[in-house]
Amino acid sequence: MASWSFRLSGHSRRLFLQLSGVAVAGVLIPERAAPVGDDSFALLRRRWRDVVAGSGFAATAEPYRTRLAELGAAAAGHRDAMAPTDASLWPDLAFPSYAATPARLQTMARAYALPGTGLTGDTNLAAAVARGIDHYRRRVYAAGADPVGNWWHWQIGVPKQLLNAAVLIGPHLTDPQNEALREAVDHFVPECLLDDYSGTSTGANRVDLCVVTLLHALLGSDRKKAALAVSALSPVFPYVHEGDGIYRDGSFVQHTSVPYQGTYGALLLSGLATLFAVLRGSPWEVVDPNRQIVYDMVEKSFAPFVHDGFCMDLVSGRALGRQPYGDHERGHAIAAAILLLGETASAAERSRWQAMVKGWALRDTCKPMLAAAESDDLGFHARLAAILGDDAIPAAGEPDGHRLPAMSARAVHRRPGWCAGLSMASDRIGHYEHGNGENLRGWHTGSGMLYWWGEGHGDQYSDSFWPTVDPYRLPGTTVSTRRLPDGAGRGWGDTRPPGRWVGGATDGMYATVGQHLNGFESTVEAFKSWFFLDDAVVCLGAAITGEDGVPVETVVDNRRTDALLTLDVEEGWAHLEGHGGYVLPCAGGLRTLREERTGGSGPVTRSYVTLWLDHGVDPVSAGYVYLLLPGASPAETRARAADPDWARVLANTARRQGVRVPSLGITAVNFWNDGAAGGLTASAPCAVLVRERGDGTATLTVSDPRRDLDELTVTWDRPVIEVLRGHPLLMSATTGTRLTLAFGRLADQGGGSTTVTVRLDWIA
């Protein structure tokens, strides 16, 4: 091996394997006859090629004919330009080239395996791939080499691509080359990495390591390795209560403290979908009963964060600003994984998922899913095209309701015509993640950032938002304006504040959500609450303090737009044309700014309209109240401002924050301490949401956001006849002139909501 020292290359982690269908419509290259007793591996290798290289389409039909020809041309170009030296395989890719060099070899191998490329089954191309793999293995990925830099390249990125290319070209990798590659993988990915479910061998990383292990088994017809790849998946499936993994409330966390459905989660789902499809019906089929949790994740963990085809940035960690329209690319990757996973799911699940993905694809007009799949993944394109062309499959709409996965300090609210997402930080979830030089100014994304999308706004945070937005003025946040260095705080999401009261209560339709905010790298402290309703979000802030010697601000909104802003200070409202309205009783203190901001590697320039409240330098117990009205017209905004009783503020202090909305029958209070407000009394810190219905019943929903209550008593000053539906944690209930509910150990609910239904006494 050459004597230079490898350094971290800065390449971001990417989903290298393009996943696609299992059903074969084109003919792949016949494999060399398998040795006696190797029939199972021959089948698995064929299936692997079907899933990874792509299938399910006619190679002579468009757009596949053109795309396959382009793949063949690219592969021929790589083959002809290959010029092995001690320092490179291609002159423009100096070693170590952890990502680009293996990727070119993989492209060449796909052109060999797929029909219609012009190089299908070309022995010279396959031989070139084999030589390239062996050359890279000798010069870079050699057994005994020091794996300097990012561990991921050595254990996952490089071996996954090299092994994949080797499997695709089959017998053209000679036995000595085959054995040497497997020895190199054994050096960097020893079996002991799968012994313990800890460190970097968890969640999506563990699934990737199992994929590498299975590829190793396919290349060497190694039954022991195949069995290990499957058995080592088992720790991924069960729900976890802390750290990396899948949570019962739908949260998915990687890097210990980062909600990560958008990238790591998509990788986990894609990897598992691939393994389930390839191994189905084989001696190594994944039969762990906990694998059903993976299927349940689709609708519990992923679908809530995919809106009109894109994956919300609030669950994408450091990748949120990786490239323009990255949220749409992540949404497409999740859709592709879901459709592949559907191949091994129940008929009912598959039917629901196809309808869901069809709806996403039809509504994603900013970066159409089908067109994107044509350039990225022909197998996914074929499957998606079949669904879009099947009138028997309905297109599911966006579901109404609220999802509050409290263990990841996130919330998502949907109503006809709009959607909102909330990103918070807590004692278990970091303010932000930076690493590998990415997301260096995402400091305040966990300070209560409120994303929202109206109709036609699917690119609001997609079109170069992150490189151009003012990082100190993210919508919804309360922050110190103290200047911060790029990459402030510890890397990889280890930026957790001490605040424990983060979360709220939801009945599945409405929600009260709160955050005891400890500012990032500042002395700012605040109590922030959001009440999610039909056409509005009521936003409260209280006890806002800071001692940094700089102003503290609450950002009402910061829209990437050049739309007309109308402000009526006297009546207390503002309206942004084509977006929505804002009602601010304290509109006289509202600051506004219209600006052009430039950033990114382009660079690019985007227009912004910012609305914020300046709490002054080192505020002491400052506060705010405002309503966000997505999609509202000027007339609707004016009317809401003229009706102060529509949402009555019951309390806005460091002890409790609450509102009553009579038209909806809602009373909601976040109790930061024990106390009373709006006819509700709580014996300990909690969130309470009461919803009176028109049929004479009401629901009372409580939660323990701090996750530490052994008992809780809530009293509602409302005559109640009886409890219609209780809960296992409801220890006792007293009805009559008032309702008193005593709950047991809510701490075990992980911040989740508990709902009790009662019949009201309308006569009393």
Image (spheres, rainbow, N blue to C red):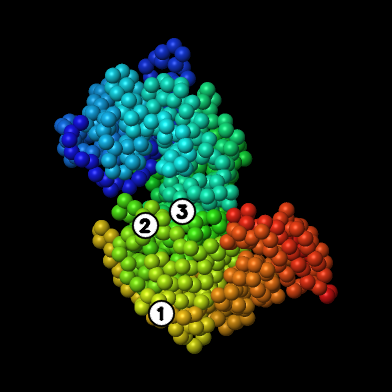
Q: Residue at x 47, y 57 (%)?
A: 429
Q: Residue at x 56, y 49 (%)?
A: 241
* Dot 1 amino acid type: Asp
User: Where is residue 278 shown, x and y percent of the image?
Assistant: 48, 29
- Dots 2 and 3: beta carbons under 8 Å? no
Q: Quadrant of the C terminus?
A: bottom right
* Foreground of the two, 713 or 391: 713
Marks 1/3: CA distance?
Answer: 30 Å
Label 2 or label 1, whichever comes before in sequence order: 2
* Foreground of the two, 686 or 333: 686
Residue at numbered disc 2: 490
Marks 2/1: CA distance?
Answer: 26 Å
Q: Residues within 10 Å of mark 3 (few under 14, many from 20)?
A: many
Residue at numbered disc 1: 618
Residue at numbered disc 3: 257
Vertical placement of residue 231 versus 643, above or below:
above
Looking at the image, residue 395 sits to the left or right of residue 737; the answer is: left
The number of numbered discs placed on residues in the rendered structure image is 3
User: Where is residue 540 shown, x and y percent of the image?
Assistant: 54, 74
User: Where is residue 464 shown, x and y percent of the image?
Assistant: 34, 60
Q: Residue at x 36, y 57 (%)?
A: 490
Looking at the image, residue 751 sits to the left or right of residue 158; the answer is: right
* Dot 3 amino acid type: Ser
- Dots 2 and 1: beta carbons under 8 Å? no
Q: Residue at x 40, y 28 (%)?
A: 215
Q: Secondary structure at mark 3?
A: loop
Label 1 or label 3, whichever comes before in sequence order: 3
Query: Is residue 39 among the parts visible in the rendering?
Result: yes
Q: Secondary structure at mark 2?
A: loop
